Amino acid sequence: MSDEPVDIAIVGAGAAGLFAAIWAAREVSGLKILAMDGARTLGAKILVAGGGRCNVTHCQVGSSDYCGSDPELVQRILRCFTVDSTIAFFEECGVTLKQEDTGKLFPTTDRARTVLDALLGEARRTGVELLHPQRVERITASGDGFIVEGGERSVRTHKIIVATGGMSLPKSGSDGQGLAMAQTLGHSITPRIDPALVPLTLAQGHWLTELSGVALFAEIVAFAHGGAVARDGRGKPVPPLRGALLCTHFGLSGPAALDISRHWLQLQAVDPTAGIRINWLPGTRPQELERELVRTKGQSVLAFFRTRIPDRFLRAACAQIGVDPVDGIQQLTRHHRGALVRAITECEVVPTGTRGFTAAETTAGGVPLSELNLDRLESLRCPGLFLCGEMLDVDARIGGFSFQWAWASGFVAGRAAARAVAGVTK
């Protein structure tokens, strides 16, 4: 079956794809814009984000919140559509955002459905045709445009925007097909494609898995015994990260674990013994804790830490090093005191893996930004092809930053594609 030609075809109608469609329609009125998605229900990732509340963005967003491609390249895109722009856009669509103490912005309804409905409503209002479930299997450059095929359907388009996501949450349609299509159109893909913002697994019976449900604010860093360190897009060492760390029956979750996951995977690829080092008292250095313990008189280990660390956690940690938590601190041998300091401020853990792409919130790796015209997010290798969202080599820390990337990159790609169709060169 062959459809009539369209001006812009968008493959993938998630956050970035919908945003690209909306801004293409807003930029040049009267264009025939078709957004296709293989999902039976659109917006699965939006609906599950932020525990079903959808963390739309963060109050402060900068290149340091992102990994993958060179941060300076990421910043060029982020400047095109700022946090203020995001707030204003959703207000136009009837969605008021509220800022929480963490800096995260959520809809005042605390319902992700509010965000998705606003995007779908604006897409329809601006004349975007949404076609789903319609899985795209092939994109072929043809003459001055492209042929998009899937099943028995074929669409001819002047310009195409691919926003299929990476490989996280594959049931939503982000199963890597878009990356494969980008390769057939001439793009390279980073050597590694990893789950990011994903929980870490520990060996069965690990003492931390026995503390399921215990959460502590912690400082965490990835390390390798051979000396290799995780590096950011500029090649600089990744500093320790802070956030809530949740012990689970399978391992570690919570913001700190999710944020460190991509860095640990990066190190683990070059050193299978790579692990993570946890400071359960962030801001307290080992030497400081050692001095405190030496000066403390008449207190048990349990009493000393009671206001700082949950008793259940402390008892388990003490059991690992052979210390009785009801013993007085002055009774500890120098060896046991040092072991206690390390257990609290330099706790080393070697994960067995992650929960994989099915549990990942985003993808690390993808098409390098260096292969795109950053003013347009148009391919330098296949003119007329625009890319945005998670399929690019840009991933963020937890807190709404991934969505801000979706909004910014979708905005740039959508407007540029529309202007290209209309023959606008500036």
Image (cartoon, rainbow, N blue to C red):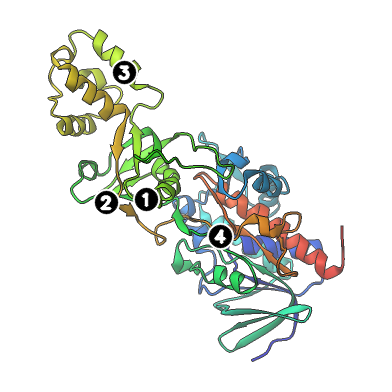
Q: Mark 4 to mark 3: distance in Å? A: 43 Å
Please tell me which of labels 2 and 4 falls first in the chain: 2
Q: Residue at x 51, y 49 (%)?
A: 110
Residue annotated with mark 2: 250
Percent from the top left, x then y, of residue 28?
Answer: 82, 65
Question: In the structure shown, which secondary structural element does the residue marked by tag 3 occupy?
Answer: helix
Residue annotated with mark 4: 366
Whether 363 is drawn above or below 86: the answer is: below
Amino acid type, label 4: Gly
Q: Residue at x 21, y 18 (%)?
A: 303
Q: Is residue 31 left or right of residue 211?
A: right
Q: Which of label 4 and label 3 is nearer to you?
A: 4
Residue annotated with mark 3: 289
For the residue carrying disc 1, how many other residues have a C-alpha within 10 Å: few (<14), some (14-19), or many (20+)?
Answer: many
Q: Mark 2 to mark 4: distance in Å? A: 28 Å
| In-front residue for pair 219/194 | 194
Residue annotated with mark 1: 199
